[in-house]
Image (cartoon, rainbow, N blue to C red):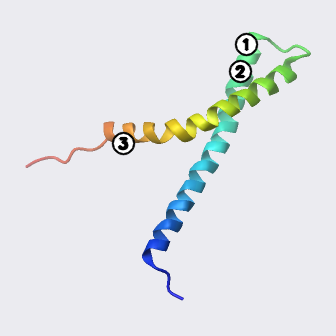
Amino acid sequence: MWRIPCDIKKQKHLRMNKNKIAFALVMGIMTTGIISFTLISVNVGYTEKFLKIWLRSWGIAYLVVIPAILIIGPRIQKLVDKLLKEKTPTI
C-alpha cells in the first residue's frame, strides 16, 4: 500500500519532535547534574549531607530546565539561525 506524501511529512515531523524531546531529557540530565554537583561542592563542600543536598538540587534543577529547553530552545535556535544566516553576495 502506497502512503500519501502528507503522511510521510507528518511522520518525519513526529520523529523530529521525539528527537527534540529525547535530546532535552538527556541534555537536561547531563547539564543539571554537572552544574548542581559543582555548585553544591563549592557552596556546601563534601559533608555527610552532600549527597542528599546534591540529589535534591539536581532533581529541582531538572524539573525547571526540561520545560525551559523545550519552550525557550526553539526560539533561541531561530534567533541564532537569523543572526548567523549567511548573506548571499551580490554581484
Between marks 2 and 3 in the image, the one whose residue lies nearer the viewer = 3
Pointer 2 or 3: first along the chain? 2
Q: Which residue is mark 2?
A: 38
Q: Amino acid at mark 1?
A: Val
Q: Amino acid at mark 3?
A: Asp
Q: Tell me which corner region of the image, top left, top right, bottom left or bottom right, holds residue 66.
A: top right
Q: Residue furthest bottom?
A: 1
For numbered disc 2, what is the local secondary structure? Answer: helix
What separation in Å lies between label 3 and label 1 (alpha carbons)?
A: 36 Å
Q: Amino acid at mark 2?
A: Thr
Q: Do callouts 3 and 1 mark residues in contact (Cβ within 8 Å)?
A: no
Mark 3 burial class by Cα count in 10 Å: few <14, some 14-19, many 20+: few
Mark 2 burial class by Cα count in 10 Å: few <14, some 14-19, many 20+: some
Residue 81 at what x, y percent from top left? 36, 42
Q: Which residue is mark 1?
A: 42
For numbered disc 1, what is the local secondary structure? Answer: helix
Compared with 53, 9 (above or below) is below
Q: Which residue is mark 3?
A: 81
Q: Along the horizontal axis of the image, is 88 left or right of 50?
A: left
Q: Tell me which corner region of the image, top left, top right, bottom left or bottom right, holds residue 17.
A: bottom right
What separation in Å lies between label 2 and label 1 (alpha carbons)?
A: 6 Å
Q: Along the horizontal axis of the image, is 76 left or right of 49?
A: left
Quarter occupied by the N terminus: bottom right
